[in-house]
Amino acid sequence: MNLPKILVLIILNTLLLVHPNFAYAQGPIPVEIVKTATGYELLRGGKPYFIKGAGGSNYMDKLKNYGGNSIRTWSTNDAQRILDEAHRLGLTVTMGLAVATERHGFDYNDKAAIAKQLDRLRKEIQQFKDHPALLAWGIGNELNLHYSNPKVWDAVEEIASMIQELDPNHLVTTMLAGINQKEVDLIKAKCPSLDLIAVQVYGGLASVPEQIRSTGWDKAYIVTEWGPTGHWEGPQTPWHASIEETSKEKAAVYKSRYEASIGLDKSCLGSYVFLWGQKQERTPTWYGLFTEAGEENEVVDVMHYLWKGKWPKNRAPRLDSLLLNGKKALDFVYLKPAQRYDVAVFVTDPDKDKLSVRWEILHESTDLKEGGDRESRPRAIDGLLTAESLEKALLVAPEQEGAYRLFVYVTDGYNHVATANIPFFVSVTEKPSHKALQPAHAHKSYQFSEKVSWSDEFDYNGLPDSTKWSYDVGSKHNGWGNNELQYYTEADLKNVSVNNSTLKITALKEKKQGMDYTSARLISKHKGDFLYGRFEARAKVPRGRGTWPAIWMLPTEWKYGGWPNSGEIDILEHVGYDQDVVHISVHTKAYHHSIHTQKTATKKIDAASDDFHLYRIDWTPDYIKGFVDDIEIFHFSNENKTYEEWPFDQKFHWLLNLAVGGFWGGQKGIDDSAFPAVMEIDYVRVYDLADLD
């Protein structure tokens, strides 16, 4: 490099240090989205730009060195410093705009408050719109989380339109919690000024491209938060402590999920990994790629690989497992007060670096928030653990009964770390009830009307009553999300008919639209939708391996998003390979079969296929109870937490169907000699909840 070039660089750096606003002299760099033959492309200054970003403004120099090119913020707090530092490093910024949320008490019917918010945001846009590090504006964060007023999208459009007028050089988006048809439809209808959408997904990242397409969104998108399996998505202990992945497990899922989605989809313009820093959210280690001490975990190595295409020269230790009393976290560890227990950690280092270990015991967190709201770190407990070697320690259980968590940090001397933790419960009894940890459910006494409010007695002949029933048709969503093998027909007397005072749903062995079987699925959606009540059906299930009849309920408006967020109520399920065993269940975001936390009761009854039996649920604001022949077998309480545990505050509708095969029904194959198979229903009835006072 010759002397004049060196002098120019020295002068430029001096000007930036002395007067950061010198950066504005360069002016804004235009950003646009262009359609390509295969999808969309982001252009910055006329050149292709794929976002390799991270959420947070810490360690920006490391992000640059590891191949990242952008950061994302949640507000304009400290925006000047962040933008200037990003520009100095050659990074860009998606600048968050703090927009009030309904879950924090903001009322989107309050026109004065909306106007005041818009005025504040206008000043923020004017202040930073010409900064050369600016890439895009992000309107709010997860405005769709726990909201009910669709006018929020009118406010988003007003903000977006204002930005487009003031700043034509940068993109405008809004950050959504998950991908839900309802929100996509509302945004398409109400927010034409948005250039793209931004989605925030954790465990479901690999399915994002397909989910985006299934909603009908045909523009570009970015992923502004993604990371480990969320605390709401994974397994929980009986005392409701979420089980966290080890740093090695996180590294594996970050890599595989990114490569299956962001790295492949040509409509995705890039992403921001969460979190380039550290925070307390359920635990001090769950989401941050760094520890409180600034150490980098194995996920940072993965991001280096994903951004640069090669691994770093020195890599983090790999922690294979952590055992307490010989058990892993999924074994649900119970300890007795003041007793001694062995602890073991199994860890290796790819570079053969000398490792050191530190341990910590915390009370289980009770300051539990949502949507990334700030949580306080639980209090540490000293003096209970003695390290015996790198991989072994001795724990003396706390004397006080309750929930705790054991953490281990293994470092390599090069600022790299491996982490893991195990929740454990201290109790004097073998199987504590955990009632002390549950919300108090002082259930009131509910009564149901003795008069039927809605029913179908099937006391006619022909097709089902079209004023009460419609049909789900086809074989959608990969066999209705369950790999089922039937094609559901519409109003076909071969598959559904009413005669001799019963409804008959018949599954046939016949080919249709590429499927080997046909059947029917009736729904009462928009013809019979209910919030609370007594729901009963008298039915007879078919025999035969491979059959899977169900009488159940789904939400009509999907208030909290797609399955399982908005819930499911199963009044009756039966699989043919397990004859006479009937099931009653509920599914929610916190409790569902995909993560093995579903709430289910089973009962073996006599002659389920020969005799009619009565299946019923009682649904109130406090509980859902399930009955077979008027004997209670199932009880699910409202824990009064969030929609994740209890989404049952919205209208649901009936579904009556006979499936063939599937992940559950076809678990032991299909006996084709069982067809035609018939489910018979004598009646379905609804009784209103009489007392809500």
Image: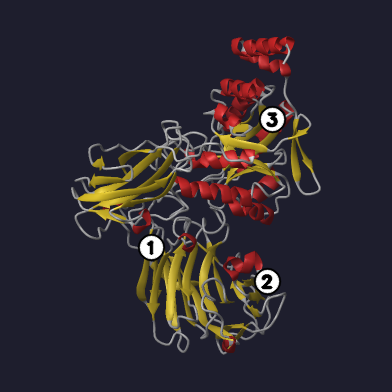
Which residue is more in the foreground, 133 or 248? 248
Instruction: Identify the amino acid type marked 1.
Output: Phe
- Residue lying furthest right: 37
Mark sitting earlier along the chain (2/1): 2
x and y, in percent, of residue 595 in the image: 46, 59
Residue at point 41% right, 43% down?
A: 419
Left or right of 616? Residue 546 is: right
Give the residue pinned by disc 2: 474
Which residue is more in the foreground, 84 or 435? 84
Q: Residues within 10 Å of mark 1 (few under 14, many from 20)?
A: some
| Callout 3 touching callout 1 (CB < 8 Å) | no
Measured in 3D between alpha carbons, the distance from the residue under mark 3 to the one under mark 1, in whole angstroms, is 48 Å
Residue at point 42% right, 56% down?
A: 235
| Callout 2 touching callout 1 (CB < 8 Å) | no
Q: Residues within 10 Å of mark 2 (few under 14, many from 20)?
A: many
Mark sitting earlier along the chain (2/3): 3
x and y, in percent, of residue 137 in the image: 65, 32
Mark seen at residue 636: 1
Residue at point 35% right, 48% down?
A: 345
Which residue is more in the foreground, 62 or 647? 62
Left or right of 622? Residue 372 is: right
Measured in 3D between alpha carbons, the distance from the residue under mark 2 to the one under mark 1, in whole angstroms, is 33 Å
Q: Quadrant of the N terminus?
A: top right
Of the two numbered discs 2 and 1 in the rendering, the one whose residue sits closer to the viewer = 2
Give the residue pinned by disc 3: 163
